[in-house]
Image (cartoon, helix red, strand yellow):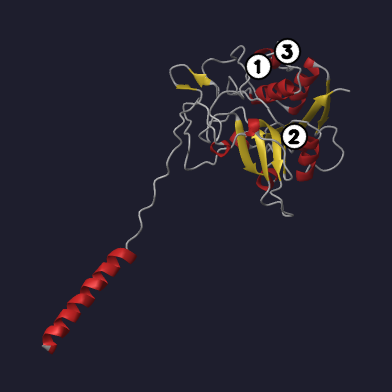
Amino acid sequence: MKKVLALLLAIAVVVAFAAGCNSTNQTPETPTPTPSSDAPNTPDADPVQGNFTDEMKIPYGQDISPDDGADGVPGYFTEREGDHAGSPYFSNIDPYNMTSTDTLTILPKYKTIQQSSEWSCGVAAALTAIDYLGKLGDYDELTLAELRPQGTRPSATTLDEAIAIFDGVGGFELVTSRNFEGEFWLDTIQDFLAEGMPILICWNDWHGHWQVIIGYDTMGTEIESDDVIIVADPYDTTDHNQDGYGVYGAERFIYNFTMYNMFGTDRADNDMLFIAAKPAA
């Protein structure tokens, strides 16, 4: 009898051990992220999931180059074709409808546009700032490009040429890396935004690119390593929501704020190039 009881006990232990292995040592199934039910170009009610409408887009005027640009190329790709609502890789926000908080300073309802050529990021960036400041009128990307000293010749827009666009439209007060007194740093960005001034920046993104800083969040801490900037990006093709906005670590950006001698060897023509604009008094 004892042998029978011992055998039954051994079997029970083995069964319990096997059951325990199956229940506790199994790798739990990783849940698959559930994408938003909203398709690109449809409203998304959750602001942390991004805005896939086009309410933030400035209407297009004349296309500088129909065969390239971030606005789409016939037969190759269309604008927003790379959108992925509910992307598991990018945390999308809705800068167009965001407002300032205790930690965030942002220019609300700042509209965007995607550049219509591979070289006109500076022109498109200026266009969004001019539109935000209420002076775009009948100008479009092409007619603003014509205000550059080199006009519509396909080439990068220098700081002086970007300034020429604002001067050509007229009615602006500009603070630039040409006339700024002091050191441009992260607190400078916050100060300009607090005055309602879009900040055009030219840096080594895309091997040389103009964007516009429209937001800054300190995240409520004393350190700067967790600060973020929000930009209006005229070549916004890589974050699964081509709404025309991007988000970067502020400290990482400031240490990469250079053009690495793309515009010659003069540091004033390459490092920390910016234009902060507001309507003239």
Instruction: Report which residue position mark 1 lands on.
Output: 141
Instruction: Report which residue position mark 3 lands on.
Output: 137
Circle 3: element type: loop
- The amino acid beneath tag 3 is Gly
* Placement of the N terminus among the 4 image quadrants: bottom left
Q: Measure how far apart labels 3 and 2 are at the Cα level.
A: 26 Å
Closer to the camera: disc 2 or disc 1?
Answer: 1
- The amino acid beneath tag 2 is Leu
- The amino acid beneath tag 1 is Glu
Circle 2: element type: strand
Q: Measure how far apart labels 2 and 1 are at the Cα level.
A: 21 Å
Q: Is residue 255 above or below residue 171?
A: below
| Viewer-proximal residue among 94 and 137 | 94
Picture coordinates of residue 11, whole percent (x, y): 17, 76
Q: In the figure, residue 61 lies in which quadrant?
A: top right
Q: In the figure, residue 214 lies in which quadrant?
A: top right
Closer to the camera: disc 1 or disc 3?
Answer: 3
Determine which of the numbered discs, if any, sits on residue 273 in the image.
2
Q: Residue at x 58, y 36 (%)?
A: 47
Picture coordinates of residue 266, whole percent (x, y): 77, 35
